[in-house]
Image: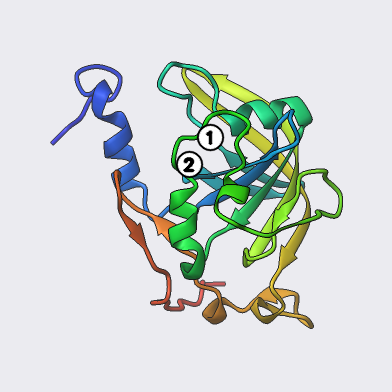
């Protein structure tokens, strides 16, 4: 079947693309609201896009009324955000933080999640996350109704048991993030790994 995502099938672009481009990592993003509360929300339109400089991008969609979501507003206003990776132990609470709340309500506080200070940004990070990326906004691109938040990663925090301290490499067999699959409710585990040596 051929689909025209700019014409006949435009209203199906989201479920088609979100179902095909899988698994997607989940950015569980903290930002600071102007009232001082910590906004926490998950986004699966997210990835790392380079290492020189270390670059991540996440795409917070708009609310149904067309206004920007809190994460987008806060990141634009403060120029900072923290991306957390989500493992199996945090999957349920991550999902709950996607529930709609009025602006200024802290999902972290609502869910009883412990926050700790970041090293170089004002936005706190989640103590329980297997990894956290402290980011400063590089730029925000708006393409149609898409909003892309580009961030430079200034600090990375990783659970001690997930990193080889000599090689400074993630111990892949110990790290089990969850991934986003098709909408509306599909996710995957990443415990079933295999290796293939790249040709040299």
**Residue 98's mark?**
none
Question: What is the quadrant of residue 64 in the picture?
Answer: top left
Quadrant (top left, top right, bottom left, bottom right) of the C terminus: bottom right
Quadrant (top left, top right, bottom left, bottom right) of the N terminus: top left
Q: In what element is the residue under mark 1?
A: loop
Mark 2 Cα shell of 10 Å, populated few (<14), some (14-19), many (≥20): some
Q: Which one is earlier in the sequence, the residue at label 1 or at label 2?
A: 2
**Residue 45's mark?**
2
**Residue 59's mark?**
1
Q: For residue 48, say whether it is visible.
A: no
Spot the residue most to the right.
120
Q: Residue at x 65, y 77 (%)?
A: 162
Q: Are marks 1 and 2 in contact (CB under 8 Å)?
A: yes
Q: How many marks?
A: 2
Check the image and report above or below for 146 versus 82.
Answer: above
Q: Residue at x 61, y 46 (%)?
A: 29
């Amino acid at each position: 079947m051929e689909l025209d995502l700019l014409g006949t099938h435009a209203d199906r672009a989201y479920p088609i693309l979100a179902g095909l481009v899988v698994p997607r990592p989940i950015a569980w993003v903290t930002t600071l609201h102007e009232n001082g509360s910590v906004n926490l929300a998950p986004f699966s339109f997210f990835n790392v896009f380079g290492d020189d400089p270390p670059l991540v991008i996440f795409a917070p969609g708009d609310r149904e009324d067309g206004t920007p979501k809190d994460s987008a507003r806060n990141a634009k206003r403060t120029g900072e955000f923290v991306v957390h990776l989500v493992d199996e132990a945090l999957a349920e609470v991550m999902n709950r933080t996607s529930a709609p709340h009025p602006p200024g309500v802290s999902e972290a506080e609502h869910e009883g999640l412990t926050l700790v200070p970041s090293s170089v940004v004002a936005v706190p990070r989640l103590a329980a996350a297997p990894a956290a990326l402290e980011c400063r906004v590089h730029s925000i691109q708006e393409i149609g109704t898409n909003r892309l938040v580009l961030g430079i990663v200034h600090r990375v925090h990783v659970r001690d048991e997930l990193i080889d301290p000599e090689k400074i490499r993630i111990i892949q067999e110990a790290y089990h993030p969850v991934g986003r699959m098709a909408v509306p409710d599909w996710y995957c585990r990443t415990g079933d790994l295999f290796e293939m040596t790249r040709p040299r």
